Image (cartoon, rainbow, N blue to C red):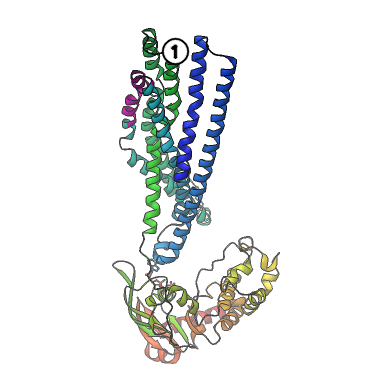
Amino acid sequence: MIVSLVMACMGEAFGMVPYVVVAMLAAGLLQGTLTLEAAAELSVVAAVAQVVKFFLTWRSSMMSHDIAFRALRTIRDEMAEKMARVPMGTIVDTPTGTFKNRFVDNVNQLEDAIAHFMPELPSNVFAPVLAMVIVFAVDWRMGLAGIATIPLGVLFYLGMMRGYEVKMARYIESEQKMNSTLVEYVNGIQVIKAFGRSASSYSMFSKAVAAYHDSTLDWFRESWVWMALVKSVVPCTLLFTLPLGVWLMSVGEITLPEFMVCITIPLSFIGGVLKFAQAASQISRMDVCLNVVWDFLGLPELVRPSKRVELSRESFSFEDVSFSYHEGLEVLHGVSFRTEPGTMTAIVGPSGSGKSTIAKLMAGFWDVSCGTIRYGGYNVQDIPFGQLMEHVSYVAQETFLFDMTIAENIRLGRPQATDDEVKRAARAAGAHEFIESLPQGYNTLAGEAGAKLSGGERQRITIARAILKDADVVILDEATAYADPEIEAVMERAIEELVAGKTLVTIAHRLSTVMGADQIIVMDAGRVVACGSHDELLMCCPLYARMWAEHTASIRDAGRED
Ligand SMILES: Nc1ncnc2c1ncn2[C@@H]1O[C@H](COP(=O)(O)OP(=O)(O)OP(=O)(O)O)[C@@H](O)[C@H]1O
């Protein structure tokens, strides 16, 4: 960046040479002393200086752009890394659009600041200073006349700067809010259409657009008056230099060439001064955008050690675990249980009783508020995140496929897996046939295929992913929730493949699917109310007995309807 700055400044210095040459040519012409050879030589000097300026400015700009894009990449990489280290709560509580804003729009704004503003700012200061040194060296009175418009310009500039940062922050905030609301709007378009609402009636979006409109106009209305004054007053140097110069020349204080130098040189630095005046908006913008980056990078992280530990064969154990997603709102209270290796644990309970929360804590998405979760004999907080994840497969309620090929989506389970292994996993998950029937088979992009895949098919792809991972513990969070009756059998076979010989923790609504579990944990309002086998719970847990009665009644009713 320093080299880029130096080259930009040198470029400005060379850029001034043609002005000096013009002054010398004009003076020679007026004095009648200009010869053809001298004119040709001076023109060559001006042309060479212009070429050198071009070369230096070009190199400086290339370097600063290179630096800018490298900085942008580093910032984005760090933000993406950070995202993997913050608790899931930070992610789910933030609207998707906000992430797009932080990562894309906000960081993009820094490009302009780093690539243009930083190298140009010193050269915009350097060029006027150099120009003034030249004019002052010729005649100090002409020097003063050359900068006479600047104090007035500074006055108007200060007028523009009043409350500028607040206005700029409001403008950027409203711009980002509008962008993120637009992303939400697009994400939620199905709901908006289904309820027959239009963009204008989606009040969040229209409010964000209106706020952006108001803040932009507010900002421009005030700034533009001042900026227009600065731009019209500062370049008027001739108003002062011309009469003073003519007078000084008439009284013999300065020569004609000196007069020409003193009126042309101040004209050469006006562009720089005006650009410098715009620096305020750049600095405020940079400040706001950088703060967004720093705030995000400063978010608290899930702290894990990096040194691998020697895990025993023990599986998960919850010891008096309490948890709140948000302070003061505890959703799990003193939960304790163990999962023995190679056994099946089912977690059941009414909606909102905390089943999925337990699954997500096992998957390491959040840290507990109180108590301890152990795996392999260690508190999970003392196990490197990557190491714990080697042992755990989490199949979530929501199936998510990345917009890459189906094969690559499955391979996420084990990046080094061969094509054959990917296919074997898909076969075991009962997904091979429908994947083969897609236009490009395993190479079909999930985004293209997405619309054609049913919920159950998508789920079998995520099960294939988990089968490929081959982890010791499989956590199934209502994994068969979207399966229709016809494919339920296929799904169950896929899951049997997935969990063969593994420790299974499953959360299921249909109690018939968990009857055979080694232990069933019954949750109610964030507490474990009972734990045992199906038969034991029927005898001793009224809540479970009621849920079972409701479940069998619903199966009977469904059978009667058929
Ligand atoms: N991300 C979140 N932020 C705040 N509260 C949450 C979050 N996720 C769940 N909760 C709350 O935590 C409680 C337990 O939710 P959880 O999803 O674990 O229940 P569940 O038993 O799995 O429910 P269901 O069977 O309906 O999926 C609920 O009161 C829920 O509103």
- Ligand 1 image position (quadrant): bottom left
By secondary structure, the bulk of the magenta-drawn segment is best described as helix
- Is 483 inside the magenta-drawn segment? no
Q: Which residues lie in the magenta part?
A: 138-157
Q: Is residue 20 left or right of residue 431?
A: left
Along the viewing direction, whichever of 349 and 270 lies nearer the viewer: 270
The residue shown at (41%, 34%) is 126
Q: Count the marks: how many?
A: 1
Residue 484 seen in the current view = no
Secondary structure type for disc 1: helix
Along the viewing direction, whichever of 367 and 25 lies nearer the viewer: 25
Along the viewing direction, whichever of 69 and 435 lies nearer the viewer: 69
Which residue has dot 1 on it?
Answer: 256
Q: Quadrant of residue 272?
A: top left
Q: Amino acid at mark 1?
A: Leu
**Figure check: 147 above or below 438:** above
Q: Is residue 292 left or right of residue 552?
A: left
State the residue lying farthest toward the left: 328
Q: Quadrant of residue 530?
A: bottom left
